[in-house]
Amino acid sequence: MYSTRKKLLMALALGVVLICVTFFPGISEAATYIVKKGDSLWSIASQNKISMDKLLKLNNIDDTIIYPGQVLKVDDEPAPQQSSSNPAPVSNPEPAPNPSDSANIGTYIVKKGDTLWAIARRHNTTVEELQRLNNINGQLLHPGQMLKISGQAPESLPSRSGSPREGIVPTALRFVGTSYARGGRSPAGFDCSGFAKYVYSLNGITLPNTAASQANTGTKVPSISQLQPGDLVCFSNGRNGHIDHVGIYAGNNKIIHASSSRRSIIEASLNDGWFQQRFVCGVRVL
């Protein structure tokens, strides 16, 4: 008796599986991409023929920093599957709403180099609110840690589907306030050329290491009035033509650069006499 009931249950389960396979052949995981060393969001978007905005939205991220081994969704449509039969079309049910899509409460996965202050600023909230929501007292964070985020959603970046240079200024602005470090090339601390190289790399563009070599990577822009957002701006401290300082033009006659005197990444006006007297040229990489 028991054996007969067990066989009936197994047959019923198998029937359910067969029905799902037959009538719902399109049910599958969305297409994904595993990040490789040297990848950027822009290059992945271009390779998979989608816009940067869609790639960011699909993966619920608002940053341009990615890591080798990270799995990214590159399409929200399931991959097509072959079927030996041609059943009548069946409409798929609407996906269940994601709780993290709430306008007021979301989540954020901590990345290497993150601080509570940087996360709070990026999401238009406060350190105190982050601490309250997540029941933490100190400032210590761990990569991979999930934080609850409240307040407004982070401001979206401009579309970068046309050219990677369109993301350079928004990327550079994210690092304003980061510490200056002589020879520094990471968010732990930047010098001028290290900052330019890092920002450009996050947008899929490789620059050489020094200010002088970066000045020779693209088309020269002879005057400040001809600069466009995203251009490199090159200076000579000794006013002798030797380029030893570089920044990124932000538009509206402003520059974002690593200031050794201010010991941080700052946004400054090119109307300042120091820049006016030491300007050599701009460089348009793209």
Image (cartoon, grey):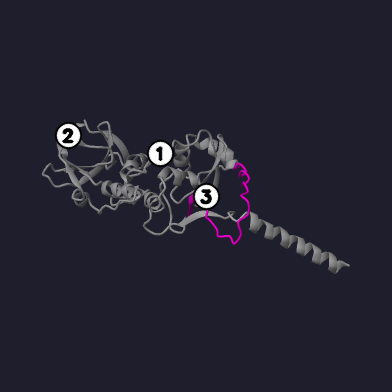
Image point (61%, 59%), residue name: 85
Looking at the picture, which amino acid does disc 2 mark?
Answer: Gln
Marks 2 and 1 sit apart, C-alpha to C-alpha, by: 31 Å
| Nearer the observer, 28 or 102 | 28
Q: Residues within 10 Å of mark 2 (few under 14, many from 20)?
A: few
Looking at the picture, which amino acid does disc 1 mark?
Answer: Leu
58 to 67, vertically: above or below: above
| Nearer the observer, 118 or 7 | 7
Which residue is tagged 1? 157
Which residue is tagged 3? 77
Which quadrant holds residue 103? top right
**Mark 1 residue element:** loop
**Mark 2 residue element:** helix
Horizontal relation, residue 193 to residue 105: left or right: left
- For marks 3 and 2 on the same chain, the one whose residue lies earlier in the sequence: 3
Is residue 88 highlighted in magenta? yes
| Nearer the observer, 150 or 219 | 219
Image point (84%, 64%), residue name: 5
Residue 276: which disc? 2
